[in-house]
Each structure stands twice: as C-alpha cells, then as structure tokens.
Amino acid sequence: MDSSETLANSMTIPIPHSTGFVYMPMLPEAAVQPYDKPVMVINIPVPTGPRRQNSLSFKTHGWVRRVHPSGRVYMYHEDWRMLLDGGAEIVCDFSGNATRVAEVAKVAARQLWDALKGAEMGDYELSLRVIMSPVTTVHYYFVDWLRRSIFWVHGIDSPRPVASEWHLYDLQELHFWTHVNFFPMHHALPPNAREEINAILAYHTIDAKTFKETTAPWALPDASGPSSSLGQARQSSGNSYITVVNVPARAITIHEGFSNASVARLWIQICTSRVYNFHGDTYVRRKRTDRRHDVFDKQPLGWLRPSLSILLLGRPARLYAELEELFVDGIIYRYHWQAFIDNDVRPHLANVTTNSTALLATNLAFLALNGLPHIWRSLSLSSTVFSMAAHITSIKLTSLSKAVREMGPPELIKMTDHKWFGLYSLALLFSLPTTIFFWSLLTFVAAIIGSIFEDWTKALKIGIPFILMTTVPLLFWSRGIQFRSILLLFSKEMIYVDIL
C-alpha cells in the first residue's frame, strides 16, 4: 500500500451540507490549536467556592471543563461525546450564552453521529475543531476506545506510506494515543493498557541488556524508569485505576487523568517505534541497523573524498561508518546519537584540546632556542600553526557537539539532509581537530629529529630523552581509545555471561 491508500473507515457516507459549513477530516495533532494572546480582564469579582478549580467545577450547556496536566484546557460534552480544544470561551460568552462555535459543533456532531447509524457501534467519541472564517469548516475525527484507533466518515489519505494492513493498525494506534495524550482527562484507558505497557517496558529492559542493536525507543538506564513511575502513580491513587469500558466523564478522577497522559506518552513511543520498524510485518526491522532502503547520502565533495580521506589519515571514513549505523533509513535514535557524541566525539575533542596546548608550548620553547637551522625552525613554526588550529577547532567543535547532542531526531535528519552537509561532511568536520593535531605532531617530531641529529653529542644528551618524553605519551594517547574499546567489549561480554 502506498500513500494514496485511504485510512478512512470502510464506509464513506455523504453528509448533507445544507448547514453552510464544510467537513474536513483531520489528525489528532491538528486538534490542538495555539492560544491567542491573553486579553486583560478588569473588575475581577471576589472568588467564591473552592480555591482550586478542578475539572468538575465548571459545566455549562452540557460542556465540562477539563485541564490537561500541562495546563491546557479543553471542553468535553458528556451527552454528545465530543470535545473541543480551548477554554470556556469556546462554548459560551461572558453572558453565559452559547457561542457560534458551540452551535456549529452541536449541529456537526448530530450529522456526524447520524452518519454512523447502521454501522457497528462501539465506545466512540468525536473530536472537533471549528474554524469560522473565511468559510466555516469543521475538522473532525472519531475515536474508537475499544480498538485503539481513529476513523472518519470521509476519505482521507495516509500521512505516510503504509506497507500492509498490520502496518496500518500500528499507525492508527499511534494516532489514537496521540489523541489520548492531548485529551486524557475525561475517559478511562482501554482495557489492560497499563498492564501491556508495563510488560513492554520489562521486555525492552531485558532486550537492551542482551541485544546491542535493539529497536527499543529508550536507553538502558531509562527503560526501567517509566515502569517504576507508573507503579508509584498507581499506588498513590488507590484502587481508582480499575479499567472500565465506556465510563462517563464524571467518573474519571484527576489522578486517573494524569496517569492517562503518562501512559499515552509511553504508548506513543512504542507505536512510533513499531511504525518505523514495520512491527509484525513482512519487512520487519529486527535490529536497529537493518536497512529497507538503499544508502543515499549527499556527497558534495565528489572526487575530493579519497584525497581528503588520505590527508586526514582515514579518520573521516571511520566516523562515516559509525554515522551510517546511526542514520538508518532516515531513522535516528536519540540515545544512540547522544552515546556517539559522548563516547566517540567529545573524548577526542577534549584530548586534542589538552595535547595541542602542550604541543604548542613545546613548540614555542623549541623556537626560542638559538642557532636552529632555518629548515627545522620552519618545520617547528608549521607545527605551531597546526597546534593552534587544532586547539581552536577542538574548542569550536566542543561547543557544536553540545548543541547537536541535544537536537531531536527531526532536527538531526534535517541537518544531515542539507545539500552541503551530508553524513560524510559531518564525519569530516569532527575529524579535523584530531588529524590536524597528528600533522602538528609529525612536523614537530621531524623538526626535533632533524635538528638534534646534526650534533650526535646533543642528540645523546638531550634529543633522545626529549623525544621519548614527548612522543611516547602522545602515541599512548592516540591508541588509548582503541585500548578502552577493547576493554569495553570485554566488560560487555562479561555482563552478557552474568545475565545469561
């Protein structure tokens, strides 16, 4: 199935437009509208009633005010089983009269519910967004709480390509939990939703420990956190978390609503991972590095790439191979990206900053010696310039690495998809400080060797000990990353043995 496949319910029922407004299917993301700039209110009356306005304290014309844990407000109509995003001003004016939006919503709800007559009814509700100008338009979708899905009575194209019927189910469930995330305060969760998410979290915790290339949407230290948080939230509210189907709005407590929002956030992560990894489909991606598309990376460097790889001692090729394993089919896991920055990029930059400073000071001391031949002084001066360049680039890229580490997957994909900033360009950029430092070290060693071997007595007394004191620690530093990698792999094998 491609993007032209419809996500609508199997029936498509025409609705009369005698009311003068147009129906438009929408996704849950479009149901939440930005608030306008607040209006100053004068002559505020003395508050009465309870100090805190809970979700049941305001009801007018059948609408009940609900407050999301983040503070957003939406209105839910108990009789019509429909909701509108926004505060009380959406459904009534200062005089208590119903607004034009509320009237349009009721007429639209009546027609949309009538369109479902004759179909298999379930635990449904209706989400609306009414736009009054220039032409009154009603955006809507139905929510099926039993099947964890949304649907429409008009046709709608899929927002992303769909591979199969099972893939479509996961996509529809993702839309459902997105709706619950936005509007969690009026309806109990579907049966066993909390039990399922706890079991999934437990599985992903074990999977992350035993399988390096897991497709779990959480890092290993984070996988057990959501499960324990859900358990604490459940205990704090006693027995009010018994799942009931088709529970009226007044039976949902504030504590349940907060927990609903938490569970929905976790389900969104799970369903997103399932959609992108073709969960339960023939094309399932069983590990993070499985590819379902050809590798395509913009290469603005063209024929310069092999030359630059040699000039930069092959480090861009190594980093590029690691980046290819992170950016698979346009998918990037945040915690794998952060681990790459923390373990592969920033340690190199920190070492280059320290060692280039030491090498710069050594070069300056060497240049201060009297009687150096011109050729060796020129080599040392070149090494000084390289050291300064390595120091400056490492500092600049350290700041850049902090910024890109906190980028979300959409920003990272957009950055690496830029015409002049593909994956290889990113690998080239992060390779500059290390390779510049190595060239600085090589030119400095050449200057030292060339100068001291002109006088064998000076070489025996000063030169050879000096070379050993400067080059051996730097060589150990350059190989230190590989030694640590071997030790890390060995420790991981030990962890696996302990678990199994």
Image (tube, rainbow, N blue to C red):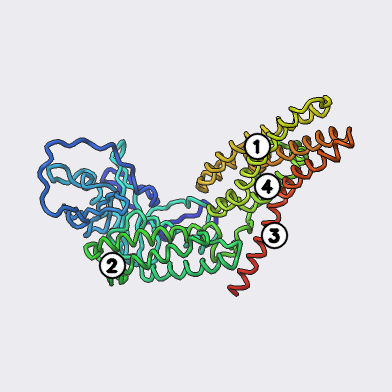
Residue that badge 2 annotates: 237
Left or right of 374, for residue 26: left
Mark 4 burial class by Cα count in 10 Å: few <14, some 14-19, many 20+: some
Tell me the distance, in whole angstroms, between the alpha carbons under discs 1 and 3. Answer: 28 Å
Mark 3 burial class by Cα count in 10 Å: few <14, some 14-19, many 20+: few
Name the front one of labels 2 and 3. 3
Q: Earlier in the sequence, mark 2 or mark 4?
A: 2
Mark 1 residue type: Thr
Q: Earlier in the sequence, mark 4 or mark 3?
A: 4
Q: Earlier in the sequence, mark 1 or mark 2?
A: 2
Q: Quadrant of residue 390?
A: top right
Q: From the image, which quarter does the N terminus lie in? A: bottom right
Q: Residue at 27% of width from left, 60% of height from top?
A: 186
Residue that badge 4 annotates: 320
Element at label 4? helix
Q: Which mark is residue 486?
A: 3
Mark 3 residue type: Ile
Element at label 3? helix
- 280, 57: nearer the viewer: 57
Q: Earlier in the sequence, mark 4 or mark 1?
A: 4
